[in-house]
Image (cartoon, rainbow, N blue to C red):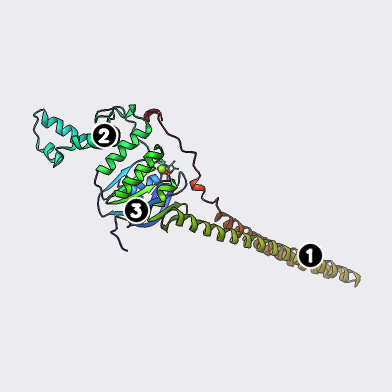
Amino acid sequence: MTHATYVTLEGVSLHLPDGRPLFTQLDLQLDQPRMALVGRNGVGKSLLARLIAGAILPTTGRCLRAGSVYYLGQYMTEEPGCTVADLLRVKPVVQALERMEQGHYSPLDLDLIGDQWMLREHLLNALANAHLSHLTLNTPVASLSGGEAMRVALLGAFASKADLLILDEPTNHLDGCHRQLLSEQLDKWPKAVLVISHDRVLLESMQCIIELSSQGLIRYSGGYSSYAQAKDLQQKRAQQRLERAKVEQKREAQALRAQRENLERKQARGQKQASDSNQANILLGRQKQRSQLTHGKVLKQQDATHQTLATQVKAAALGVEEPHSIFIQPARTRSNAPVRSA
Ligand SMILES: Nc1ncnc2c1ncn2[C@@H]1O[C@H](COP(=O)(O)OP(=O)(O)O)[C@@H](O)[C@H]1O
Ligand SMILES: [Mg+2]
């Protein structure tokens, strides 16, 4: 089944301010309604998400968007004076509505409001439906717990009508019940979503899982179980490659040792025969020199072979990682701490 392509990345690279390349030459099409992005902490998922959303530009390459993208970041705003309206990203429209109510007419405000005359009522309704009726649009974000702030921010994301939602670690502050609610909301969401998460339950409902690693992007079809199966197979193959490389290294080392010993025996025999046959000193010296040269050459070749094999073992070992290590997370905790102090 083919879907619309929401975002296309072409040869995208991103360098950090210190010049370090975070990722290079990424190509990707976001073309399914339910997608996830996974990878080890620090690998660059959040920066890639911000790049897809247009919040930052790639160092090279380009990112093409077919519609609007709403990026809900991993960390809530800590700006002083931030309110629920900021978390919902509706403050400019709310302020325009307030100015109109106070009799300050402006065409700019009229444009800003568009058809959203009932926006505040809709949002207060939505807050009440989400069991957040104790909040108003002016409630300071600093007074909310991490879970409340995430629930409000999610509400704003789902109210946005964006073509593609990017939710960055949305379940981190949510308890089991609200994680379940989020899954249900995602099931009902009529547009596309890219979720960055380590939550296996959430990942299970995805149509594809895209993994970001130092090797770039790899796309796996299906949800978490299919991903885990593919990773298991990859691991088994990598483990087999490592075993084969180690066996080869051992076998070669034995062959090289035998070659060296053989050469040394031959040298000793040659020298003994030469001195027994009373050869002139000058001839003896030349023979010794020749033999040392051959010995040196063989040792050099052996050294190179040793190094090649060690590099092969090292490369094979790099392919072997802890199974699903990116999913080993601290136990889920319910966060009730205010956002600012979290
Ligand atoms: N604004 C920034 N300036 C410099 N380095 C940054 C900035 N943001 C993130 N980084 C670095 O970029 C890397 C990737 O960060 P991030 O995208 O947050 O990773 P992830 O979301 O996969 O955990 C990390 O090493 C982080 O320290
Ligand atoms: Mg992140």
Q: Nearer the viewer, mark 1 or mark 3?
A: 3
Q: Which callout, 2 or 1, points at the residue further toward the start of the chain?
A: 2
**Label 2 crowd bin: few (<14), some (14–19), many (20+), radius 10 Å:** some
- Identify which amino acid the numbered label 3 is placed on: Arg
Q: CA distance from mark 1 to mark 3?
A: 64 Å
Q: Is residue 280 above or below residue 217?
A: below
Whether residue 57 is visible to the viewer of this picture, yes or no, is no
Residue to which mark 1 is pinned: 261
Residue to which mark 3 is pinned: 34
Whether residue 284 is visible to the viewer of this picture, yes or no, is yes
Q: Position of residue 85 (x, y in %)?
A: 25, 33
Q: Considering the numbered disc 2 on the image, is that residue within a helix, a strand or a loop?
A: helix
Q: Position of residue 7 (x, y in %)?
A: 30, 54
Q: CA distance from mark 2 to mark 1?
A: 85 Å
Seen in the image, is 97 located left or right of residue 141?
left
Q: Nearer the viewer, residue 26 or 285?
A: 26
Residue at the image position 13 percent from the left and 36 percent from the top: 109
Q: CA distance from mark 2 to mark 3?
A: 28 Å
- Identify which amino acid the numbered label 1 is placed on: Glu
Ligand 1 shows up in the quarter that is: top left
Place residue 82 in its image quadrant: top left
Residue to which mark 2 is pinned: 128
Q: Which callout, 1 or 3, points at the residue further toward the start of the chain?
A: 3
Ligand 2 within 8 Å of the CB at mark 2:
no
Q: Nearer the viewer, mark 2 or mark 3?
A: 2
Q: Is residue 213 above or below residue 302?
A: above
Q: Considering the numbered disc 3 on the image, is that residue within a helix, a strand or a loop?
A: strand
Residue at the image position 24 percent from the left and 44 percent from the top: 160
